[in-house]
Image (spheres, rainbow, N blue to C red):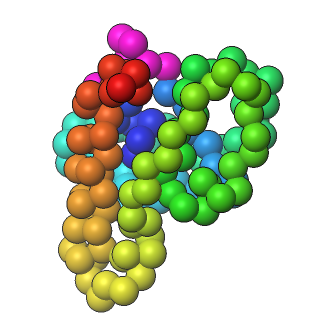
């Protein structure tokens, strides 16, 4: 969802790539809630951070605790930030209906949008 929002809201100034320490595939609930707000992430794919070794980044942002703890060390000069969003699949696991599960994803989707909107200027503060 972070990559989708960054591409939708900030494509003129942010080149966004999303990766994790594990791949899980594209979550259908995430695809649905992003589509509700006009962001198509259906063509994105789950990628490992190893795919980006040797790439030149200005910023690395981790958005879940597991990635923050397991994220590999990047070269000096790359600014790193951690934003601890709740994990929608973990939240949804406690829900009984699809509507409740979608609500978990919607909450995090909206939080992510709020994080992306002031970028990249917010990184400089």
Find residue 103 and report its image quarter: bottom left
Q: Is residue 12 visible?
A: yes
Q: Position of residue 3 (x, y in %)?
A: 45, 36
Vertical relation: 124 (above or below) 52: above
Q: Position of residue 62 (x, y in %)?
A: 54, 46
Q: Position of residue 117 (x, y in %)?
A: 25, 31
Q: Position of residue 4 (x, y in %)?
A: 39, 36
Q: Is residue 8 visible?
A: no
Front-most of residues 40 and 1: 1
Find residue 98 and report its image quarter: bottom left
Say which quadrant the C terminus sits in.
Answer: top left
Find residue 19 and report its image quarter: top right
Vertical relation: 6 (above or below) 87: above
For image coordinates 23% across by 77% down, the residue present is: 100
The answer to whether residue 68 is magenta is: no
Q: How many marks overall? A: 0
Q: Residue furthest front?
A: 125
Magenta stretch: give its range.
7-15
For image coordinates 70% across by 42% down, the residue present is: 49
Q: Is residue 41 left or right of residue 97?
A: right
Vertical relation: 102 (above or below) 92: above
Front-most of residues 43 and 49: 49
For image coordinates 32% across by 46% down, the residue present is: 112
For image coordinates 36% across by 11% down, the residue present is: 12
């Amino acid at each position: 969802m972070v990559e989708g929002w960054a591409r939708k809201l900030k494509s003129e100034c942010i080149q966004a790539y999303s990766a994790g320490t594990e791949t899980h595939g594209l979550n259908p609930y995430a695809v649905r809630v992003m589509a509700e707000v006009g962001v198509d992430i259906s063509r994105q794919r789950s990628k490992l951070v190893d795919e980006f070794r040797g790439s030149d980044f200005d910023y690395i942002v981790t958005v879940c605790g597991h990635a923050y703890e397991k994220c590999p060390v990047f070269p000096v000069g790359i600014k790193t930030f951690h934003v601890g969003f709740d994990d929608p699949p973990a939240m949804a696991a406690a829900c009984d209906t699809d509507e409740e599960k979608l609500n978990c994803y919607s909450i995090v989707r909206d939080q992510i949008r709020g994080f992306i909107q002031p970028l990249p200027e917010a990184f400089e503060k």
